[in-house]
Amino acid sequence: MKDITKKYTNGEITINWQPAKCIHSAVCVRELPQVYNPKERPWLKIENATTEALKAQVQKCPSGALSYFMNDEANKERETLETKIEVLENGPLLIYGTLKITDKDGKETIKDKTTAFCRCGQSANKPYCDGTHIGAKFIG
Ligand code: FES
């Protein structure tokens, strides 16, 4: 999948959407169905929720596919994530924070915000989760 970023703004907040990072946990669709509807175009209707509701939801995005920034230059607020590790039930291992990852061939990659590592062994993009655990019905 292309490494693209789409931006949606209500004039106060801008939400960045990076589809290549999405692990299809559907947290956004469950939390704010009036905003996130994959069956509609555009799939993200930022005008259907308050800025505070949007911020709260984006902070729960487990993959980091959704992120935001406040448009006001005087307000450089950005979501702040503590470094933490979380095991998603029947899904990936999430590591929050900036990571320098060296792959098996010695190639280094910098990952920021949230990185999802495959726990099911079925990902075609190891060591990262690509959402395959859902179709594989991974339990763990
Ligand atoms: S845990 Fe998501 S593809 Fe393996």
Image (cartoon, rainbow, N blue to C red):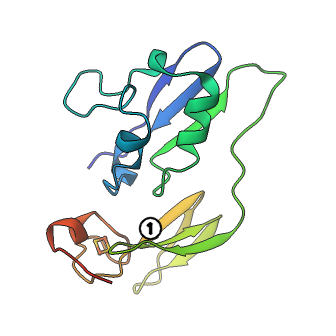
According to the picture, the residue beneath numbered tag 1 turns out to be 116
- Say above or below: 103 vs 110: below
Furthest residue in direction right, as rendered: 74
Residue 92 placed where, x, y %? 39, 73
| Residue nearest the observer in this picture, 131 or 108 | 131
The quadrant in which residue 14 appears is top right
Q: Residue visible at 40% across and 87% down?
A: 104
| Residue nearest the observer in this picture, 10 or 35 | 35
Q: Residue visible at 77% across and 35% down?
A: 77
The quadrant in which residue 2 appears is top left
Q: How many marks?
A: 1
Residue 83 placed where, x, y %? 69, 68
Dividing the image into four equal quarters, which quarter contains ligand 1? bottom left
* Left or right placement of residue 118 versus residue 97 in this view: left
- Say above or below: 10 vs 70: above
- Say above or below: 1 vs 51: below
What amino acid is labelled 1 in the image? Ala
The kind of secondary structure element at disc 1 is strand
